[in-house]
Image (cartoon, grey):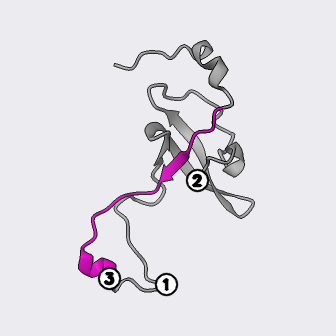
Amino acid sequence: MTAKVDLERFERLRDVSMRVQADLDRRPISLRELLALRVEDVVVLNRPAGENIDVYAGGALLASAEVLVVENRLAVRIADLQGQAGVGPANNPVTGHLGSGVE
């Protein structure tokens, strides 16, 4: 069960940079396959196209998100926040403008 977070407790930490990571997918690959990789090879992932990806902040799962292209850059739109489905600015893509700690 996820407890509701009291955001006022974190007010002093608002300007702390955190690393944000968006994972497309993870899959096992053999050493043979890894050593055989060449430029322009395609690595097929397990996640179906169009499925939401996982977004982590500080190593902890933060959200589920949709992959977008904004001004020729990859971006993610938050679909669900961990423990708070449907909360957040659904129409505001999270892009590289979050600060220096964003991947």
> Taking 4 as reference, is 35 above or below it?
below
Q: What is the tally of numbered marks visible in this picture?
A: 3
Give the mark toward the camera: 1 or 2. 2
Residue type (three-letter) at the residue carrying disc 3: Leu
- The part of the chain drawn in magenta is 16-34
Instruction: Tell me if mark 3 has few (under 14), some (14-19) or many (20+) residues whose alpha carbon lies within 10 angstroms of its own.
Output: few
Q: Is mark 1 on a helix, strand or loop?
A: loop
Disc number for residue 35: 3
Task: Please state which amino acid type lies under the numbered disc 1.
Answer: Glu
In this picture, is 31 found above or below 55?
below
Task: Judge by depth and name the residue closer to the eye, 85 or 103.
Answer: 103
Looking at the image, residue 75 sits to the left or right of residue 21; the answer is right
Which residue is at a point 38% across and 83% down the rendered structure image?
Answer: 37
Among the two numbered marks 1 and 2 on one chain, the one whose residue lies closer to the N terminus: 1
Label 2 belongs to which residue?
103
Q: Residue at (36%, 58%) from the top-left corner?
A: 26
- The residue beneath circle 1 is 40
Q: Residue at x 47, y 48 (%)?
A: 52
Q: Is residue 93 left or right of residue 31?
A: right
Along the line of sight, the residue nearer the viewer: 78 or 33: 33
Please say if 58 is above or below 2: below
